[in-house]
Structure formats: structure tokens, C-alpha cells
Amino acid sequence: MAENQTRNELEVRAQKVQELRRQGIDPYPSVAFERSHLAQEIHDHFSQPQHQLANGEADPQALPLRVCGRITFKRDSGSIGFIGLTDASATIQLKIEKKLVTGDPGLTFNQIKKLLDIGDFIGVEGIGCRTNRGELSIQVSRLDVISKATIPFPDSYYGINDPELCRRHREIDLVSNSTSLQRFKLRSRIIRSIRTYLWNAGFDEIETPVLQTIYGGAAARPFITHHNTLDIDLYLRIATELFLKRAVCGGMEKVFEIGRVFRNEGIDSTHNPEFTSIEVYQAYADYFQIMALVEDLICAVATEVLGGSTQIDYQGDKISIDRQYDYSNIYPTFTGKHWRVKTMVEAVRDETGLDFDTLEFSEAKSKAEAIGVRLTDLNTQNLGYLLYAVFDQKVESTLIEPTFIIDFPVEVSPLAKRHRSKPGFVERFELFIHGTEYSNGFSELNDPVDQRQRFEEQLAQKQAGDDEAHPMDEDFIQALSLGMPNCGGMGIGVDRLVMFLTDTQSIRDAILFPTMRSFKDT
């Protein structure tokens, strides 16, 4: 029944397109429409005391109004019709009177009544009025079709309830779901706020290659493509890190890039094969200063786009982003009050009781198995890999309030600087909120000899079967050999930040057009 109704409506709309053309009206004209006002501006204008209208009154000043947008409702009542016109700002009602809309120029009353549908784009001229029932409207004197919609428009009340359809055809989701539309508008504001914050902090925005001969900067499997002219395989970047740090080697002291990165990995609520990241690198900084930057950036963006609020409602929990803890006595370069900070060893000990500061490998392995940690050939090679596995499987999901986990094992951090006082560890942090990683950063490794050794260790892991191990990058080592000052860097997953600030459960609803399985595979 539903398929037949849809087919019938498609046929009816196609016939209306042909009928418009038969009557000499182009359903897709190329002439620009010059609007004078947005719908919200009209509402604001007539809400002012000096411009308020009584019920049944037309604007005595006859302010000319030219508006355009989409038809979102349509009602006929004898010789008067009403249309809801929605633009990017709001909806305004149009009052169509047969005696005023003659079709010279524009459409006639009967053409409007019979040949226009919900979903069509139109442009109108008229003046403000208030109906007898008190609804602010535009009394239309001319109406032109701008674009005819030829498929059924989503139900104005129920919208679209199929998440698959919403993600595959986001345009339908946007027109039927105001929450979704506002989410993606807020996403734009979030990215603009990030960019403005960093510009104001003196960072230079640069662009790095998306196609790379050697992928790097993260632990991930790449997408591979081929360049025909050069006859070489290229990789879509998995991170922007290495080229940004090469810019620091060249003398740029504060750089960032906001851009798409690509990882050939699974899809779940927090992962999409292509996503947006922000990476930042600052010369002469360490990981504590970068942690402070991450916190201040997120707080600044959140308070700006959420109207000053520091309480975030996310998936049923209220999460405060107010600074709470003072670590200046422990970490002298981490001054001021900040979010919670724990070393990875402390976090594992607090949650599981396993103290990796005192355990030998065999005992740690036995106790990890006893609490249900899934062990693989990789994470049973040494204590560092085992510590990371316990944290990943048993601790990460418990970190609800904003928490920095610092001091990672060197084995899982091939680009981070060795810890200044803890052998076997590096100066690295990750930020967790509501059990999800939001940021990763470290004091950057700038010793070319140490970097080569780390890459060689990663190559051994790759040969042992680790598909996500980091490849050797001779160009990056050469850049480090030129000299890079001590440097702090970080990355933030923009899509996850959008999820957090818009209370969105799935990353596929924070990305306008996410990666979807093709129809033939469904």
C-alpha cells in the first residue's frame, strides 16, 4: 500500500512539472531571486512595539518583503490559501488571496493551488499582515516557483524514524528533523570556534598532504590508492602529525591543521573510516602545557557554543567541565586548576588493584588473566604492552568525568619523548570523557637516533603480524636530523567533540555524510 502511494505521488508530481512547462512556467528557472528579509527578521521586525499589527491588519507602512524558501505546509480555504515558507532562519506563513495573486507576473492563484506541493522552493513578494486569528503572515502579491520537488516530502510531524535512511540520505533527515539540522549547524560553529581560538592564540593554520607515499603519525591501517602517471601506490593519510612536525623543524613554532583523516578500520558508535581531526604543535612546550591547551580549548569552545554553560548533558549524565584540581605541587609546569590527572599505572591500580610499579611480568600476566583481560601475542610480550591492555579493557570505560591519563609505556608510543624521570615510559597523555578518548598528545620525540630505533621496533611488530604498526619514514627522520626544538603536540577528534557537545550517541550522526555500506551489500 505504502509503495503504491509513493509511486502514485511520484507520478502526480512528475505530471505537475510537465503541466508547469506546458503553461509556459519553468519549474527550475536560472534567474536569481533577490531576497530582502529572512523569515526570522520579519518576525523580529513585527514584534517591535512600533510595528506590531492588530488581528486582521495589514502593514500600514507597506514595507516591501521579498522572501524565499521551501513550502513546509499548504492549506486551501476557498479563495484564500495559506503556505508555510521555511528558510534557514525560521518559518513564516504566507497568505494567498485569489484577488491579489493574479499571475501577472508570477503564478496565478489556481496554479499555486493545483501545481505546488510541500517541498517546493518558491519566492514571494508582499507586505506584512496579521490574520484574523492573529498569525503573523505575508500578504502575497506575487509568487514564483524556484524549484519543484519531484519526490514525496517527509511527514511534517513524524519525520523519518529510520536511522539508516537518515544517514544514507542526510538531506531528508535535515528537512524532516530540526534537531538534526541544528546539530550540524552547531558542528559548524564548533569548528569555527576551534579555529578562532587557535588563531587568537598565535597558531598558524597550514595544510599537509592527504595523499602520502608513506603513511604515519598513528597506529592504524591505511587506505591504498594508485597514481597512474607516477605509477606508484599512495596512501590516504591516517594522521597529519609528521608533516606538521616537519614544519616545526623548518622554523614554524605554532602550527595546526583541521582536516579529514582516513583509517581502514571498523565502524562503531565512535569510529568512522574517515573523520575530522585537529592537530596542534607548539615549539618549546611539554605535554603539561599541551594538556592545559586541550582543556582550555575545549572549555572555551563549549562555553561559546552552549551559551556559557559548563554543565554538559551527555547520554543521561551531567558532566562538569569546570576546572577542579590543583597539580602544581606535583607537576610544576601544570599550573592552575585542571581536570583530573592520573598516571596509567595509578588508574589501573585504582580500578583493578594491579600495581604495575611492583609486579613482575609473570605475576602481572596471571592476575590480568584472572580479572578477564583478553591476552594476545602482542600484549603479552612485555610489561608495557600488558599494562596498556589492562587499561584499555578494564579502566578506560570507567572514566566518566574529564580525566587525563598520562605516562604511557614506551612500547605503545613510538612518536613520544621518553619520560624525564620514569624509565620505560613516555611523556604522553590521553583525555577521556564518558569512557571515550577525546584527545591524544605528548612531548614530541625530537632525537633522530631514538626515533629511528622506535621505527625499527615498530617494523619488527609489523613483521610479527601487527597491521597497525608504524612504518619507517626516512623523510621524517631527516627532518628531525635538521633539528626540532622540544615540542608539545596534540590531536582532538572533532566528531567526538561534536557528539559530546550535542548529546549524540553515534559518530555517524555527528558526521553529515558518514560512510555507509552500499545497497548491493545490504
Image (cartoon, rainbow, N blue to C red):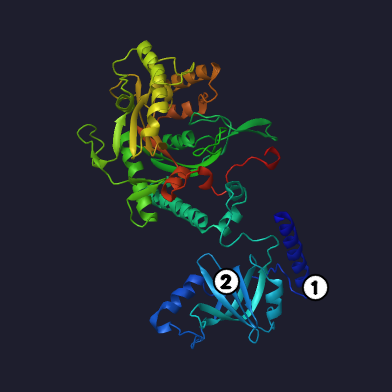
**Which amino acid type corresponds to the residue marked 2 in the rendered image?**
Gly
Query: Is residue 67 positioned above or below 397 on the image?
Result: below
Q: Which residue is mark 1?
A: 22
Give me the residue at 19% from left, 33% from top.
329
Give me the residue at 67% from left, 72% from top.
145
Do we see residue 495 in this rendering?
Answer: yes
In the picture, measured across the screen, residue 450 lies left or right of residue 162, that is left
- Return the x and y of residue 121 as percentages of the image width and height: 63, 67
**Which amino acid type corresponds to the residue marked 1 in the rendered image?**
Arg
**Residue that extends furthest to the bottom in the rendered view of this protein:** 60
Question: Does dot 1 land on a helix, a strand or a loop?
Answer: helix
Query: Is residue 276 positioned above or below 487 on the image?
Result: below
* Depth order, front residue of 241/223: 223
Q: Which residue is mark 2?
A: 84
**Residue that extends furthest to the left in the rendered view of this protein:** 329
- Return the x and y of residue 424 as percentages of the image width and height: 35, 19
Do we see residue 209 in this rendering?
Answer: no
How many numbered discs sit on the rendered protein?
2
Q: Of the two numbered discs 2 and 1 on the same chain, state the one appearing first in sequence.
A: 1
In the picture, measured across the screen, residue 411 lies left or right of residue 345, that is right
